[in-house]
Amino acid sequence: MHSSSLLESTQLGSLKLKNRFVVAPLVRLRADPLDGIPNDLMVEYYSQRASFGLIITEGSIMHEECNSYPATGCIYNEA
């Protein structure tokens, strides 16, 4: 594979990707450390990288009893 191939668009299922770069799903610990609610710091982080390529966003905690890391984004309540 030539290095220029990384910059070429590709199809991934139904997604048309502008290049072949993928950011792995990593927990960035940028949510509110007390309640896990996503915040402006997370918006800024992903906005800065939005034009890069495919971003598989970080994991989200599904139930408050399963949260083992402070500042991990949570989706188990309305907030």
Image (cartoon, rainbow, N blue to C red):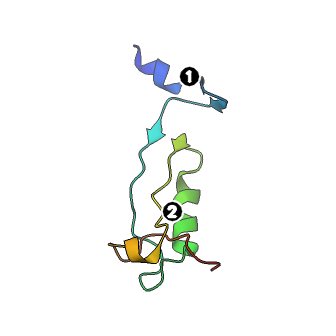
Name which residue type carries label 1.
Glu
> Can you give x and y, in whole percent of width and height, for residue 50 in the image?
58, 50
Secondary structure at numbered mark 2: helix
Circle 2 Cα neighbour tier, 10 Å, few/some/many (<14 / 14–19 / ≥20) = few
Between 25 and 20, the residue placed more toward the observer is 25
* Location of residue 24 (image quadrant): top left
Q: Earlier in the sequence, mark 2 or mark 1?
A: 1
Residue at x 47% of width, y 19% of height: 4
Q: Are marks 2 and 1 in contact (CB under 8 Å)?
A: no
- Name the outermost residue toward the bottom: 34
Which of the 4 quarters of the picture holds residue 54? top right
Residue reaching furthest top? 1
Q: Which residue is mark 1?
A: 8
Instruction: Give the image location of residue 73, x and y in percent.
Output: 48, 69
Give the residue type at disc 2: Tyr
- Residue located 53% across and 52% down the image: 49
Q: Quadrant of the C terminus?
A: bottom right
Give the residue at x 42% y 70%.
72
Which is more toward the observer, 65 or 41? 65
Q: Dot 1: few (<14), some (14–19), or many (≥20) neighbours within 10 Å?
A: few
| Position of residue 64 in the picture relative to residue 75 (left or right) | left
Residue, x 51% and y 62% (percent of image)?
A: 45
CA gap, disc 2 and disc 1: 25 Å
Residue situated in front as seen by the camera: 41 or 15? 15
Q: Which mark is residue 45?
A: 2
For label 1, the SS is loop
